[in-house]
Amino acid sequence: MKKLLMLLLVSALAACNSDQSAVPAAESDHVETADQIAKGPHGGRLLVDGAFALELAIFESGVEPEFHAWATQDGKPLAPSEVTLGVELKRLGGRVDAIGFAPQAEYLRGDAVVVEPHSFDVTVRATKAGVEHQWTYENHEGRVQIPAEVAAASGLKTEAAGPATLSETVTLYGQIATNTEHQREVAARFPGLIRSVRASIGDTVKAGQTLAVIESNQSLEPVTLSAPMAGVITARDANPGEQSGDKMLFTITDPASVWAELSVFPRDRAKVKPGAAVTIRAADGGDAVSGTISRIALVAGGNQAVTARVVIDNRSGAFPPGTFVTASVEIGSRAVPLAVKASALQAFRDFTVVFEQVGDEYEVRMLQLGQQQGDWVEVLDGISAGAQYVSANSYLIKADIEKSGASHDH
């Protein structure tokens, strides 16, 4: 099934890329490809209108990215003061950044930071001696178009960036034990001869079910020994022909409730408290269960660890006594105004990113991150609250952008 979905994705994306208006690389069919962009002597894009030419570059060596521009007339440099220049950057989603320019030494310098990603539709307007020159071109980076049906078939999932509660946790290890509060030991009320036994170790019994018949030594009448609760026979010390005496004949355990006994070593004792929320998973994997720490032992064992106990609903039978477990214990939480799922994060160039969805288009968003705790990571900058981002299978977006050759050309 996974192979089929990947084939669907590749086929549909190939179809999208055959229509160059949807090419996710730096340029579309309306302008040059990245390798064909005319360059000026400073390595910037060369824009020509008759005898007037403008070289426009994003300069980011040791500074925040900013535009620099150089103008020429008939191939001869113009003084920066002779040219009035403005640039508009229309980004995916409709936002427009307007950048003005001022003379700086031998070039014109933009008055605003060109924020990442450097992916936009560009409009350039330059005026020299009352004559206006205008150019438009696409400079798309980290952008790809995927039809909705292909995105759905590929398992892409999105959700809105927004507030979240980050939980600080510690990891503890332990073992499942019988919940002795859900266990009963059964003895005869009066000593006598055990005439018959009707339950064996491993049998499941109901409350009131006959476990044995005992002939009283005093009355010589048969007395029925019944199960006081439902559960499983986990111990038996009764055989026909024996005297019951005052010993425990049966032990009944309810397997639907067990204890997780977790070792808390000295470094974590001050952090782990009764009432803390716990997520427990068997050491060999499987589904997790949730609970809270009900009590913490006062006495440390030989390994200097105290035992924290968690009552687990084990009606599924996934945690039989003796199972080794790993537990994540919540020791604190903090609400943050903006966060994304950790599963959404990908590496792109030198950044950690997510991919924002706008219609059928997906584009990289470079993030400034705060703390990561559990499934969530705090976002300090790089995406807006409410933006839809790819939270599952985002690696497919990254792979297609890399395949299409999305550039960082300036």
Image (tube, rainbow, N blue to C red):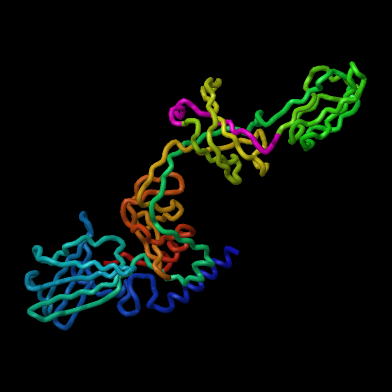
Bounds of the magenta span? 254-271
- Name the quadrant of the N terminus: bottom right
Task: Choose between 312 and 94: the one closer to the eye.
Answer: 312
Residue 288, horizontal then vertical, whole percent: 57, 44
Q: In this view, does 126 lie to the left or right of 315?
A: left
Identify whether 63 is placed above or below 54: above
Classify residue 311 by image quadrant.
top right
Residue 369, horizontal then vertical, whole percent: 34, 50
Task: Choose between 73 and 353: the one closer to the eye.
Answer: 353
Q: Which residue is drawn at 20% across and 62% down?
A: 66
Q: Can residue 36 be seen in this view?
A: yes
Q: Is residue 280 left or right of residue 121?
A: right
- Name the quadrant of the C terminus: bottom left
Q: Is residue 305 located in the magenta-colored stretch of the structure?
A: no
Q: Can residue 405 be seen in this view?
A: no
Residue 120, horizontal then vertical, whole percent: 30, 69
